[in-house]
Image (cartoon, grey):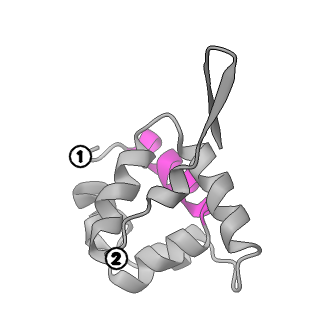
Amino acid sequence: MTARTRGAQTVMNLIALELPDVITDWPAWLESHLVGVHLRDLVQQLEVIQGTPYQPMTLDAALANKRDSVLLNGLKALDEQQIVALVRSPRLLIEIQRLIFESGGEY
């Protein structure tokens, strides 16, 4: 959760609740957080919502053979099942952010 102070009042920003209703909008929404400053807040919130991942995944398993494509084209290179896996195992988003920072790509 991201907390902002407005006068004497603290306002909590629940980023995870802003996840779009339409799954085809998830890649762009997630990407905005991959390069933003509140990714860790989002990951923590998704972990609270999701609980323990049903099947913990490695980043290699989640991206399958699309690692280079993700670096070139972003998360839109992934299929729907892979995007859902990222939301269900949100720590992978931090690993993708690290991959982006280390390997660059179009980001």
Tell me where residue 13 appears, x and y as whole percent. 56, 41
Q: Quadrant of the C terminus?
A: top left
- The rendered magenta stretch, by its main secondary structure, is classed as helix
17 vs 47, nearest the viewer = 17
Residue 106 marker: 1
**Looking at the image, residue 50 lies above or below residue 79:** above
Circle count: 2
> How far is mark 2 from mark 1, CA to CA?
23 Å
Q: Residue furthest top?
A: 7
In the rendered structure, the answer to whether residue 25 lies left or right of residue 98 reads: left
18 vs 23, nearest the viewer = 18
Residue at point 43%, 79% (across, down): 82
Tell me where residue 87 appears, x and y as whole percent. 53, 70
Residue at point 40%, 57% (across, down): 30
**Looking at the image, residue 14 lies above or below residue 93:** above
**Amino acid type, label 2:** Ile
Residue 23 marker: 2
Q: Residues within 10 Å of mark 1 (few under 14, many from 20)?
A: few
68 vs 76, nearest the viewer = 76
Q: Secondary structure at mark 1?
A: loop
Q: Quadrant of the N terminus?
A: top right
Question: Residue 6 occupies which quadrant of the picture?
Answer: top right
Q: Residue furthest right?
A: 52
Q: Residues within 10 Å of mark 2 (few under 14, many from 20)?
A: few
Identify the mark nearer the N-term, 2 or 1: 2
